Image (cartoon, coloured by chain):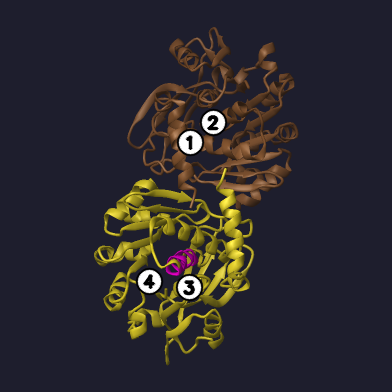
Chain colours: A yellow, B brown
Amino acid sequence: MPLLVVGSVALDSVHTPTASRENVLGGSAIFFSYAASYFTSVRLVGAVGDDWPTPHTHLLQSRGIDTSGLEVIPGAKTFRWRGRYLPNMNDRETLEIHLNVFATFQPELHDEHRRCPFVFLANGSPKLQLQVLDQAEGARLVVADTMDLWIREERDDLMRLFQRINGLVLNDSEAKLLTGQENLVLAGHMVREMGPKFVVIKKGEHGAMFFSEHETYVLPAYPTEKVIDPTGAGDSFAGGMMGFLAQSGNFEPTTLKHAMAYGILAASFTVEDFSLDRLRKIERQDIDRRMQEYRKMLSF
Amino acid sequence: MPLLVVGSVALDSVHTPTASRENVLGGSAIFFSYAASYFTSVRLVGAVGDDWPTPHTHLLQSRGIDTSGLEVIPGAKTFRWRGRYLPNMNDRETLEIHLNVFATFQPELHDEHRRCPFVFLANGSPKLQLQVLDQAEGARLVVADTMDLWIREERDDLMRLFQRINGLVLNDSEAKLLTGQENLVLAGHMVREMGPKFVVIKKGEHGAMFFSEHETYVLPAYPTEKVIDPTGAGDSFAGGMMGFLAQSGNFEPTTLKHAMAYGILAASFTVEDFSLDRLRKIERQDIDRRMQEYRKMLSF
């Protein structure tokens, strides 16, 4: 089934302890849709400026991603982010952020987008996410991401959003910030009690945790020794997860766990190079081969 | 098969953000042997002072632990440790440490102890561990623990030890310190190349990683929302792991993975209360019940 994603589209400049890249393809909706494209047909909604390199759009299209919702705003500039990773490759600092066109992004969904049954609200303010939700009339499963900025500054809108989504994906530090609880198992349940039917806490190199009313579980990350650039890992995780759910056409408990594993594997490829450089070199069969290894790793 | 452990026996004073305990039963060999006692017959070698409460010895004996190697040194005092956990319940600071009788501990193994096929060298200097190893004539599997102090101050002896052991268990920060490598997958392999046939990196609330020449895997921690006191979790992990290996009488790859899962579950009980207060309330069937849940959690 088709999967809609609305979120940021960016040009990233990334500094790691051993290498750097300037103005490479990035943004939550980009990593999400590219990872999801291995599983289902993806419809991307976002905005860029006229500094946007057209080959980026072609790259997305080459994976069958519907870019008809990617608006190019004349005279505007694309969202830019510059960040530096610390030697542990987990913590990072933002050096520069220019929201540019993303600051005034007011998505208007096409009819076809409005009818999408699977919807992911990627990085964006809860106000923006609610606005998309108002238009997503055909949505059967809505999952949102959030981040520290919105938890700190737009908590009321976030709580309103939580009443209207099926699932929430956030990382460990965001879950602690949102709940004031250091124990992630407790934090996960507390977030769930704020509204979402299920909550996924991403733990980076330590995998991900799942919480619903009846289930709590943890899956580890795939142990990769090649961590070149973690940018986009969380969005690729969400893309792999939602992509598999949309492919399966349901969100039953067993499908959800399988989907979370696919999310973990999609992220494990993303971190192996800058931007989409690793993902664009793989096929679905590479993900499935890693899935076989991953299942073997978890069985005894 | 019988399992020998040589290590520290202590009286711990523990401060957590919500509660404290004074002079409770602790020490690496204690947590190890209690956890291992659910799987096999355990022989404990250690030393205490005449301040040692005899009921502690009876508690160990009630689980069938052979305490004939627990020497009570007249006029000496038992090893004491006082520590405080930070709100994340993962990081801790040592407030006081009195090695007392442990500072001059020179274990002399009985004949029966020398013949033990499974041996665990718990917390102690590499010199002490080597000295035990010289006496462990019947050892078929030797696994050692180590800690930051010895990595920093007795590296040469540690490297000598590594040439003579089958397995090494250490935590994530120790693996990073030992190798200078922040990526734990790389660090694990680097430690293995220093000598041990296999290496287990304990990641606390994030589970544990295993490294041998042909295998690399990660298992997550059991997600417990009740973390009262993490003291002894790592030693209980090693106890559960070695206990199951000794029970199985082999250390084949499949047994090792199963053993690591038992280690994770033993630790998950330990953290649910101070000292041995949780472990002493359970039976083997409680561990096996949790194992069923754990296996279910990891299958999809």
**Are both tags, 2 and 4, on one chain?**
no
Q: Is disc 4 placed on a helix, strand or loop?
A: strand
Q: Which chain carries label 4?
A: A
Label 1, residues with CA under 10 Å away: few <14, some 14-19, many ≥20: many
Q: Is disc 1 placed on a helix, strand or loop?
A: helix
Q: Which mark is residue A118?
A: 4
* Marks 1/3: CA–CA distance: 38 Å
Prevailing secondary structure class for the magenta stretch in the rendered image: helix
Q: Give the residue at mark 2.
A: B240
Quarter of image, res A89: bottom right
Q: Which residue is drawn at 71% across and 39% down?
A: B197
**Are both tags, 1 and 3, on one chain?**
no
Please name the amino acid that badge 1 sits on: Leu
Q: Is disc 2 placed on a helix, strand or loop?
A: helix
Q: Residue B265 carries which label?
A: 1
Q: Do residues under tags 4 and 3 come within 8 Å of each other at their CB atoms?
A: yes
Task: Looking at this view, name the residue that lies furthest to the bottom.
Answer: A74
Residue A85 visible (yes or no): no
Please name the amino acid that badge 4 sits on: Phe
Does residue B170 appear left or right of residue A36 in this picture? right
| Nearest to the observer: residue B48 or residue A246 | A246
**Residue range highlighted in magenta:** A235-247
